[in-house]
Amino acid sequence: MKINFWMISTIVCVVAIAILSIVAVNFNNSGIGEKAAGDKMLSFIEKQKLGNATIISSVKEGSLYKVVLNYQGQKIPIYLTLDGNYFITQIISTNGSSEQSSSQTDNIQIANISIGNSPYIGNENAKVIVIEFADFSCPFCAAASGYNSQMTDYMKQNNPQWEPIVNNLMKDYVETGKVLFVSKYLYGHSGGHPAQIVAWCLNEQNLYWDFYPKAFENQADVEDLSKMKTLAQELGTNTTELDSCIVSGRYDEQFDQEQNEGLSTGVSGTPAFFINGKIIDGAVPYSQIKSAIDVELNK
C-alpha cells in the first residue's frame, strides 16, 4: 500500500507548521547536513512509534533536504527544512509543478520483464500481462492478495472504498482469459523464504495457485517450513516430490534472481505490479489496477 502514515493527527499538525516554516527558512543556512536530516526523520518515526523505516537516500535540494525512506516496503519522499525542525511530504514549485510520491510518478516507467520460470496463470495469449513482485511475509502483499481478512479489514478502515487487487483480478480478468498473471519474488518484510520455497516446489505439481491464497491466509506461519509443508499436504501434494525439491536447493538462486530483476526495473517495495511493463507500486485500490488494465485492453 502507498501508506500515508501522516494521517495520524500529530503528524498533520507538524505538516501544517512546516508549510509556514519553509517561508521563514534562512536560505543561506548550510543546514544540519544530509546524514543528520535522515537520522532526524528516523528518530521522529521511532518516537511516534510508527514502525520500522530505513533511509534510501538523503540529499540537499535547494532550501530543503529530500529524504527518501523505505517505510514498510514503500518508497516515501519527505522534505525537511535546513534546520531539521520541520518537514512536509509534498512540495509545490513556483512554476506550478509538484513533487509527489512514487504512487503517481512511477506509473510512467516501462520495463521489459521476462516470465522466465516464474509461476503464472491465465491465457498465455492474453493481450495484457500483469506481473506481481511480492513476498508471502509482507503484510501489504497479504492485503493486496485479498486472501487475508485481517489486512483487508485494516485497509478498509483507512479507506472504505479500498478493494484488494489479486482476488478481484483473478475473477475479472484471469478467469475470463483477458490477463496472464505472473508471480515473482521480492524481499518485502522478513523474506518469507520457507513459504516461497514450498510454493515454487508446488508449482512443479501445478499447486502453486492453490497454495498462494493459503499462504497469505496463514501469514503468521510463513517462516515455519514444517507448517508450510503441512499446508501443502492439505492441498494434496506429493510429499515425497515436495521434500525432494526442497532438499535439492534448485530454487535457492531464484530468490536473488527475481529480487535483482525487480530492483533493476524500478521496484522499491512490495507489492508492485507491472501491467504490460508499466509499474504501479503498493497495495493501491483495485480500481487503479483495473483502470490500467482496461487502458491496455482498449489499445
Image (cartoon, helix red, strand yellow):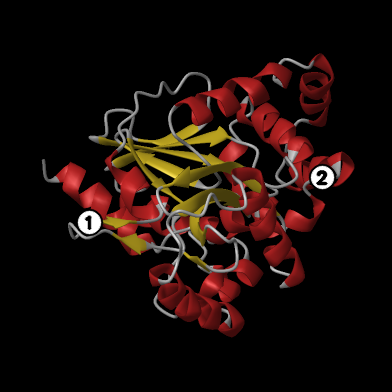
Element type at mark 1:
loop
Q: Please say whether residue 156 is visible from this viewpoint.
A: no
Residue 1: percent from left, percent from top: 51, 59
Res. 142 image quadrant? bottom right
User: Going 39% across and 53% down the picture, which residue do you hit?
Assistant: 103
- Circle 1 or circle 2, nearest the eye: 1
Residue 107: percent from left, percent from top: 31, 45
Please state, as top left, top right, bottom left or bottom right, where the C terminus lies in the image: top left
Q: Amino acid at mark 1?
A: Ser
What residue would you read off at disc 1?
97
Residue 32: percent from left, percent from top: 62, 52
Q: Residues within 10 Å of mark 1 (few under 14, many from 20)?
A: few
User: In the depicted view, which residue is nearer to us: 227 or 19?
Assistant: 19
What residue would you read off at disc 2?
223
User: Going 47% across and 57% down the picture, which residue do you hit?
Assistant: 167
Q: Please say whether residue 121 is visible from this viewpoint.
A: yes
Q: Vertically, is 85 above or below 42?
A: below
User: In the depicted view, which residue is nearer to us: 200 or 67?
Assistant: 67
User: In the depicted view, which residue is nearer to us: 294 or 76?
Assistant: 76
Res. 24 image quadrant? bottom left
User: Going 51% across and 54% down the picture, which residue do you hit?
Assistant: 29
User: In the depicted view, which residue is nearer to us: 10 or 31?
Assistant: 31
Compare marks 1 and 2 and give the one earlier in the sequence: 1
Q: In the drawing, does residue 290 fall left or right of residue 281?
A: left
